Image (cartoon, helix red, strand yellow):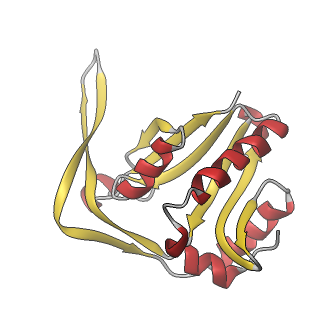
Amino acid sequence: MKLDSARLHELGAGYTSSAVYHVDKSEDDTQTTISLHLQELENPYKKHWLPDEVMDARYTKMIEQGLSLGAYDGNRMVGIAIAEKQAWNRTLWIWEFHIDSAYQKRGIGRQLMDQMAQVGRAAGCRVMVCETQNTNVPAIRFYRAVGFEVGAVDLSYYSNKDTTDFEIAVFMKRFIE
């Protein structure tokens, strides 16, 4: 597979969510608790990002590792999974995972993720990891449907003001061994 930057940006330019997971944290000397509570929104949350040449160059190098896959309808890419292995903890880190909106709800995402699990096992990985946001409820629901669970929450992954700026990093994990 070769990176088609334009197609990647068509597939993964953003998302819309009608709900968010509100994140609560409490902490004292004896206990720290972080919880996620689903809340419906009056107005959908919309996230859009622009192409990034630095990330495209990084993704090109990841694809060269041979652990990334695409899903195709003829010659047209309709899904993509860009991944790299982290050898120190035997993790297949899936940096990008997108299915063309016209092809969603057909099982293509599930098949692609199951193939990623096979790729990960063949590479000696024990777990797959995807990072998303508490605002991307459709992604969290998809990951759960294909065997992932919340493995971690980072309250300052994107900035020093993540909790006040509304987006919290949610790390989804699927054990593959």
Please tell me how many numbered marks the rendered image carries. Answer: 0
Q: Quadrant of residue 10?
A: bottom right
Name the residue located 47 percent from the left edge and 43 percent from the top edge. 145
Is residue 38 depicted above or below 31 in this figure? below
User: Residue 50's spot in the image, x, y percent?
Assistant: 51, 81
From the image, which quarter does the C terminus lie in?
top right
Name the residue located 28 percent from the left edge and 15 percent from the top edge. 30
User: Residue 32's spot in the image, x, y percent?
Assistant: 31, 25
Q: In this rendered view, identify the residue nearer to me: 79 or 90.
A: 79
Name the residue located 57 percent from the left edge and 75 percent from the top edge. 11
Is residue 10 depicted above or below 16 in this figure? below
Name the residue furthest left: 42
Q: In this rendered view, identify the residue nearer to me: 116 or 5.
A: 116
Residue 157 seen: no
In the displayed structure image, the side of residue 7 where residue 44 appears, left or right: left
In the displayed structure image, the side of residue 120 where residue 111 appears, left or right: left
User: Residue 143's spot in the image, x, y percent?
Assistant: 49, 47
Name the residue furthest top: 30
Q: In this rendered view, identify the residue nearer to me: 25 or 43.
A: 43
Name the residue located 69 percent from the left edge and 80 percent from the top edge. 5
Q: In this rendered view, identify the residue nearer to me: 28 or 126.
A: 126
Q: Quadrant of residue 45?
A: bottom left
Name the residue furthest bottom: 6
In the displayed structure image, the side of residue 116 where residue 148 appears, left or right: left
From the image, which quarter does the N terminus lie in?
bottom right
User: Residue 152's spot in the image, x, y percent?
Assistant: 46, 37
Is residue 133 depicted above or below 36 in this figure? below
Residue 104 seen: yes
